[in-house]
Amino acid sequence: MGKKKVKVSASDAREVLLVREGFQLADIDPDSTPGLEGDNGDVKEVGRELFTERDEELADLQERMYAQARAGNPDAPSLLVVLQGMDASGKGGVVRHVFGSVDPQGLQITSFKAPTKEELAHDFLWRVEPHAPKPGFIGVFDRSHYEDVLIQRVREFAPPEEIERRYGAIVDFEQRLVASGTRVLKFMLHVGPEEQAERLLERIDRDDKHWKYNTGDLDERALWGEYAEAYQIALERTSTEDAPWWVIPANKKWYARLAVKAVLLRTLRDMNLEWPEVELDQDAERERLEEPTRLLKESLKRAADR
Amino acid sequence: MGKKKVKVSASDAREVLLVREGFQLADIDPDSTPGLEGDNGDVKEVGRELFTERDEELADLQERMYAQARAGNPDAPSLLVVLQGMDASGKGGVVRHVFGSVDPQGLQITSFKAPTKEELAHDFLWRVEPHAPKPGFIGVFDRSHYEDVLIQRVREFAPPEEIERRYGAIVDFEQRLVASGTRVLKFMLHVGPEEQAERLLERIDRDDKHWKYNTGDLDERALWGEYAEAYQIALERTSTEDAPWWVIPANKKWYARLAVKAVLLRTLRDMNLEWPEVELDQDAERERLEEPTRLLKESLKRAADR
């Protein structure tokens, strides 16, 4: 195999893809692979290698966070990952492949569908709050409270002043989460309309993909421009220092997964997660482990005698 | 590498390890590896190869089950896996390694701790029922309602007649689950007292394992014989055709994980899971996909004009 010509930029995906002041969604090319430059095939191959390279570290960091909570540390942190994007933008694939590499015991995955009648009767955050991750857990929202300023805005399911109110309510809600020890990471998977058409066509064509297809998807697709506007506004209004948005070019599935994983890993690293301090007199416990061995034998004898 | 001398028995792990009429826990050697015979090192190596061999099939079957539910099939099945065993018997490792290889979106993992005051004020199944897996999901119980006839019996937390009542209540509960479309698989990870001592010692010795150590574990260990009896009775009374128990020799972690995975895979295979039938006029949808492309362009134009 020849030498691969790929420039892996040393810069942090967190910086490159972050939604800052002046951000324009229209400037982002869904085909691009920021941070990885070179020939198409080579870039993909390097990306695949990078994807699994840090799995052990990721699993270790997640376990430390989980251990903090299990050991009863009242300040045990947690992490919330919000995933948004048009239909077929690859949200499910991110959950499966990025979060599939950490211990499922530490995950809380919530998939938000169209609200029920009961949910609609409450404030839009009512159904969201109970799914905030428990201490030590990584919570993943596949769609989220952002639907309430995206489809609800585009479809005019709520009046403009209510939509307006929601941006502030979301910022407040996320700040509360952060104040209680939850890191909040938000990702928009930015797919282009041509790529979406190909993916939807695959769902129509393949028997094993039909269940992912919804005839309504095409109605939303027809409002692409309106959705782009709704996303632009939501990103502007709710990307805060505490709870930032990253826009991830998502026409290449491998890249979107790699980028989300990179931000996740960097965030966990920055949290300086230690193994919890547990009060334990090791010598005394080792001795006690000997003592019960005697008790255990008596117990086995009792059982045998019965 | 020389030829490995391992006999992989063609028989089904479901048959070999099943708790049947006349089963005696005392007959099971926690060190054994039923179905895999040969030199120790070779057996382990073969076991490791077998472990990942069918991952793709397992993931595919799980996705079909999930797809059934997502497509709205009212008879979509689900699966409940109950894991029991003494402390450090490897329950967490089974969750992580066996269920870590399926899509986390289709998993519902519940870890049952000592009951709270509120939970104790209700019937013992009150806290369990809400965690029964949703259609399409694999539910995993790390400890379960069986604690109510194990620790509660050994420690006499409930009077004998109440413990007696519970065996029947458990059988009824599990039959209800089965009747509503949930397959129920129950595994006891059978570790020996010497192996447990080694694992507990490791938790005492290693800083990164302290959080898993509970000084109370040694008190339960001292009642090994009583626990063995309580397990024997629970297995006898609750291993039914609908909701069978398997006792898994668990001194070798790799074997226990392999055996659970083998039973899981065989069960999913037997469920004859198909991709859901979805009513879809493919030609019409393909046409509609073209039509919205026109609408989409108009939408983009509207957005650009604003």
Image (tube, coloured by chain):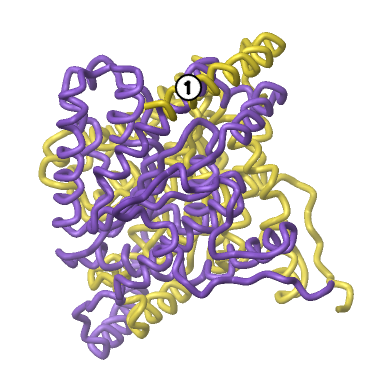
Chain colours: A purple, B yellow
Residue A38 visible to an observer of this rendering: yes
Q: Camera-side residue: B18 or A274?
A: A274
Label 1 packing within 10 angstroms: few (<14), some (14-19), many (20+): many
Q: Camera-side residue: A9 or B13?
A: A9
Q: Chain of mark 1?
A: B
Residue A132, position in %: x, y? Answer: 25, 45
**Residue at x 63% of width, y 32% of height:** A199
The residue where tag 1 is placed is B299
Q: Camera-side residue: B64 or A147?
A: A147
Residue A46's place in the image compared with B2, above or below, is above
In the displayed structure image, the side of residue A69 where residue B187 appears, left or right: right
In the displayed structure image, the side of residue B32 where residue A280 appears, left or right: left
Residue A291, position in %: x, y? Answer: 28, 82
Residue B272 visible to an observer of this rendering: no
Which of the image's four quarters has the N terminus of chain A?
bottom right
Q: Quadrant of residue A287?
A: bottom left
**Residue at x 61% of width, y 30% of height:** B64
In the displayed structure image, the side of residue B10 where residue A97 appears, left or right: left
**Residue at x 21% of width, y 86% of height:** A281
Residue A110's place in the image compared with B111, above or below, is above
Residue B150, position in %: x, y? Answer: 32, 50
Secondary element type, mark 1: helix
Q: Quadrant of residue A8?
A: bottom right
Residue furthest to the front: B305
